[in-house]
């Protein structure tokens, strides 16, 4: 008997990069480019906006535009160098540093002064971003992270994250002056106020200690507030930034890395997701 004729089976044709890219774009809403560059640890969103506006960023070989959205299959380059966008969510690194007086919060200083970045451990494929600043003569808690998005949520004025300071003053505040600090003091850049202030024991003679909380974090704000009242700050220590308290074990010039658990709590406190952001091409089979 004649053998049945079998039609040759066709092997499935692999999808081209363009087809896979289109599929992802149709299924995933995408994320703003400046946000993802910040998440990759290249700087704050504002820094990334400036970088994109300057034409230093490209997406799939084309110069990127501010506000452009990117997808998991996009190829992003910054100044010609390809950037790994962390679509598969990874918790950022966060560390606390007890900054001593005499160090500046800058990567480079033309005067050759010591900078806070000199003591930080290296992070592969990313860099440390300082959350807020402390001036040369202020010590205390300085927070660093590899996530520009997290740094933005903690330091941008619109989120009004609290900063708590221990302040040693030459002289003693009157009740009226303490009330004035909470209602508002006129400075050269506008009215500034503290959220709360209280007197603390431990001062000697003319030196009196106070604890206060502010939200704005303007340049030298605490010192300028007291100067406006005719009082001089002899020592200023930041003891808390948002939900992060500086532990007493963290001595001057020392640093401590937050655990993944603490980082996860911090991310949720800031309203940031810790769940993986995966594309359809990265998903495995569903579990029954």
Image (cartoon, grey):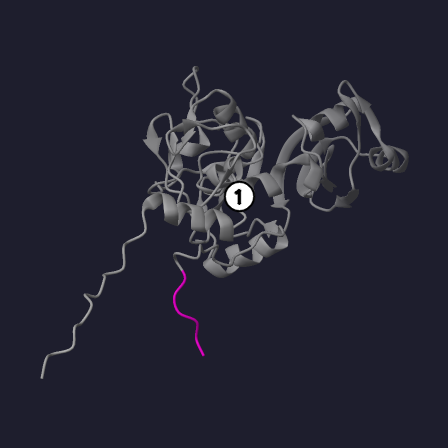
Can residue 256 be seen here? no
- In the rendered structure, does residue 19 fall within the stretch colored magenta? no
Give the residue pinned by disc 1: 31
Of the 4 image quadrants, the one containing the N terminus is bottom left
Residue 85: percent from left, percent from top: 41, 43
Residue 233, quarter of picture: top right
In this view, the residue in front, 14 or 119, is 14
Residue located 58% across and 27% down the image: 135
In this view, the residue in front, 18 or 139, is 18
Residue located 50% across and 61% down the image: 261
- In the rendered structure, does residue 286 fall within the stretch colored magenta? yes
Whether residue 212 is situated above or below residue 169 in the rendered picture = below
Residue 206, quarter of picture: top right
Residue 210: percent from left, percent from top: 73, 41
Residue 13, quarter of picture: bottom left
Q: Residue furthest top?
A: 110
The magenta region covers: 283-288
In this view, the residue in front, 257 or 56, is 56
């Amino acid at each position: 008997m004649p053998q049945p004729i079998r039609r040759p089976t066709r092997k499935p044709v692999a999808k081209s990069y363009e087809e896979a890219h289109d599929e992802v774009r149709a299924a995933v809403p995408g994320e703003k480019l400046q946000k993802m560059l910040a998440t990759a640890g290249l700087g704050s969103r504002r820094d990334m906006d400036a970088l994109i506006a300057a034409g230093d960023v490209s997406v799939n070989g084309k110069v990127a535009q501010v506000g452009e959205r990117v997808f998991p299959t996009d190829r992003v380059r910054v100044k010609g160098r390809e950037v790994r966008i962390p679509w598969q969510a990874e918790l950022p690194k966060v560390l606390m540093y007890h900054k001593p007086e005499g160090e500046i919060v800058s990567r480079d200083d033309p005067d050759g002064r010591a900078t806070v970045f000199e003591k930080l451990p290296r992070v592969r494929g990313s860099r440390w971003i300082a959350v807020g600043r402390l001036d040369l003569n202020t010590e205390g808690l300085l927070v660093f992270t590899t996530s520009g998005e997290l740094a933005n949520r903690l330091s941008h004025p619109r989120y009004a994250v609290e900063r708590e300071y221990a302040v040693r003053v030459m002289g003693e505040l009157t009740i009226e002056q303490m009330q004035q600090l909470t209602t508002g003091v006129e400075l050269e850049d506008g009215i500034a106020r503290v959220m709360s202030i209280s007197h603390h024991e431990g001062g000697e003679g003319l030196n009196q200690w106070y604890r206060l909380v502010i939200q704005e974090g303007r340049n030298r704000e605490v010192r300028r507030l007291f100067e406006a009242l005719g009082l001089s700050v002899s020592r200023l220590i930041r003891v808390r930034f948002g939900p992060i308290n500086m532990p007493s074990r963290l001595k001057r010039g020392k640093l401590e890395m937050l655990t993944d658990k603490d980082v996860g709590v911090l991310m949720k406190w800031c309203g940031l997701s810790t769940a993986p952001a995966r594309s359809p091409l990265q998903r495995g089979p569903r579990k029954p």
